Image: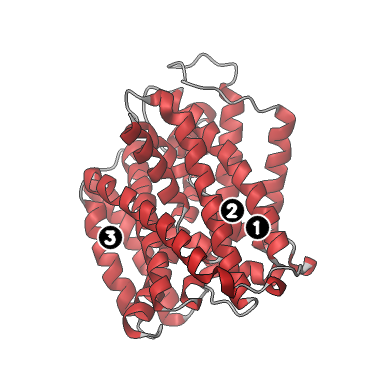
Amino acid sequence: MKNKTFLAVSTLTGTIIGAGFLSLPYVMSKSGLVIGLFWMILLSIIMMIINLTIGEIALSSKTIHQLPGYASKYLGRKTKIIVFISSIVGFYAGLTAYLLGEGRSLSFLLLGNENFELAAGIIFFLIVAIINMSSIRLFKKIEPIGVIAILLFSLGIGLYMFNKIEISNLSYANYEYLLLPFGAVLFSFLGTSSIPEIRKVLQKNEKLMKKSIIIGSLIPLFVYTLFVIIILGIHGENVNEIATLSLGRISAILGIFTMFTAFLALSLALKDTFKLDFSLSSRTSGILTNIFPLIFFLLITIFNLSGFVKILGFGGAISGGLLAITILIVHEKIKNRKLERKPEYKIKIPLLIKIVLIIMFILGIIYEIL
């Protein structure tokens, strides 16, 4: 049972901790640590609630779906397409960002510069595409290893670099950039796509789901806080878009591990969306999951169309916001409805709180678009 909990926690944590947190020191170097921590704490709590909410929705149904499937089931078929499109934005934004980040990180690690990010990104893509097209059992073996490596590496960097931190780099606040961290921070805490997968992992042990979601949602906050304080404390405003590259080759390994495990988790969730919610074959789902991030990566890299942080901010605010809004609406819809099965836990969120959260996400989407 402990192994089940650990696997469930590592699945959620591995999904959340990805390319997103590597952008946090950069955006917080603009806003300041105080403003950044405010957004990290607030959005980590909110996304934990959202994760628990989708968890209850998943446990209320006999069949397992991704969010588009649950939206269709409880809000109508037309909603399924809308939610699917918003999901796709987040999925492909994340996967594309991971390819960009891995390309730059691998090039920096192996060759000492970022000039070969295109070739390194393609090599990384081929490796994860092979894993993605294989069985989930292989992913289950890799995910816990990646999460343990992330935690140990973060603690190691913290202890080694602690005496190099300058307080002056952590004490400023620039309110001109008060809202700047929103999209990147929200993206960094997105993990809703892994919740149905956690139910699979905990099959016949669903009573562990609430505990697993809470632990899996809070671990990233600890890792992010430690990471941001170290990077900002040492480099201040001179931070690379991919923060691990600011600390040298060895620290680039942390970014490579996090993006590797997160890419696998996110691509698996997207593959399940095509299979479970649109009844596509495993082969077709795998092709659709892999081909578009590669195309976007090639276009963005060759023609320099966008940056790492911009992609994450766009994906976080728009996709994350729309998905969170949908989850809250579905949760309200099933509150007084006869369910297919009795969920192992229930989350009580007052309607007023849901409205406030929905308004916040809408404003975040508008800000990112403008």
Percent coordinates x, y for residue 324 in the rendering: 58, 42
SS at circle 1: helix
Percent coordinates x, y for residue 48 in the rendering: 56, 40
Asked if the residue at tag 3 contacts the one at tag 1, i.e. Cβ–Cβ closer than 8 Å, the answer is no
Residue 340 vertical position relative to residue 56 in the rendered view, above or below: above
Q: CA distance from mark 1 to mark 3?
A: 29 Å
Residue shown at 65% from the left, 71% from the top = 29
Residue 178 vertical position relative to residue 64 in the rendered view, above or below: below
Left or right: where 116 falls relative to 123: right
Residue shown at 54% from the left, 44% from the top = 218
SS at circle 3: helix
Taking the image as drawn, is residue 298 in sight? no
Residue 105 vertical position relative to residue 367 in the rendered view, above or below: below
Q: Amino acid at mark 3?
A: Val
Q: Amino acid at mark 1?
A: Phe
Q: Earlier in the sequence, mark 3 or mark 2?
A: 3
Nearest the viewer among 198 and 269 is 198
Asked if the residue at tag 2 contacts the one at tag 3, i.e. Cβ–Cβ closer than 8 Å, the answer is no
Which circle marks residue 182 in the picture? 1
SS at circle 2: helix
Q: Amino acid at mark 2?
A: Leu
Residue shown at 43% from the left, 70% from the top = 101
Nearest the viewer among 235 and 266 is 235
How packed mark 2 is, by other alpha carbons closer than 10 Å (few <14, some 14-19, many 20 or more), is: many
Q: CA distance from mark 3 to mark 2?
A: 25 Å
Nearest the viewer among 289 and 50 is 50
Asked if the residue at tag 1 contacts the one at tag 2, i.e. Cβ–Cβ closer than 8 Å, the answer is yes
Q: Which residue is mark 2?
A: 186
- Residue 340 in which image quadrant: top left
Residue shown at 54% from the left, 77% from the top = 240
Q: Which residue is mark 3?
A: 128
